[in-house]
Amino acid sequence: MALTTTAPDRAVLLYDGECVFCRRSTDRLRFLLRDASLDYVSFREPGVLERFPGVTEDACEQGMQLVTAEGRVFPGAEAAARALLRRPWFFLAWLYYVPGIRHAADWSYKQIAIRRFGISGRSSACKDDVCALPGHRLGEDDAA
């Protein structure tokens, strides 16, 4: 069963605003869609996750989350596909739902999400090792 949460006034795409790769990807998506009915919000901004009960920080660390205007939540690669489907000329996004392609897209998305800080680095806004990989705090073993 799909996760549901408090319905926003309009759809919201939650992304990691402290990840350079995530910010660039979100900027590209915003440019492609040019959809004024979709808000792009960093889940790291104070109070954001409180607006969407059931959407956890851990889930957001694993990938972007699309919260529809009806309150349905779609994670990761499906969030991207659903966002693209909001525009009629992105009909190819339906390919995500083809058996085999969905599995490959989900796996690929997960691999990128795990390595996202290594791909493009961390934002200069990261302080106190907040941008360390999920479940891993920077420490003496990491100093090189």
Image (cartoon, rainbow, N blue to C red):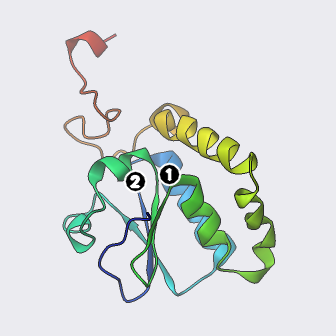
Q: Kindly identify the residue that appears in the image at 32 percent across and 35 percent down.
A: 134
The residue under label 1 is which amino acid type?
Cys
Q: Nearer the viewer, residue 3 or 55?
A: 3
Q: Nearer the viewer, residue 89 or 98?
A: 98
Residue located beneath label 2 in the image: 16
Instruction: Classify mark 1: helix, strand or loop.
Output: helix
Residue 108, x across and y down, in percent:
63, 39
Q: Are marks 2 and 1 in contact (CB under 8 Å)?
A: yes
From the viewer's perspective, is residue 140 above or below residue 53?
above
From the viewer's perspective, is residue 122 above or below residue 95?
above
Q: Is residue 125 visible?
A: no
Residue 137, x across and y down, in percent:
24, 27
Left/right placement of residue 87 relative to residue 42 reads right
**Sequence order check, earlier mark of 2 and 1:** 2
Quarter holding residue 70: bottom left
Left/right placement of residue 105 relative to residue 142 reads right
From the viewer's perspective, is residue 92 above or below residue 139?
below
Q: As drawn, which residue projects farthest toward the front?
A: 1
Residue located beneath label 1 in the image: 22
The residue under label 2 is which amino acid type?
Asp
Q: Using the numbered discs, state the Cα–Cα distance from disc 2 to disc 1 in whole angstroms.
A: 6 Å
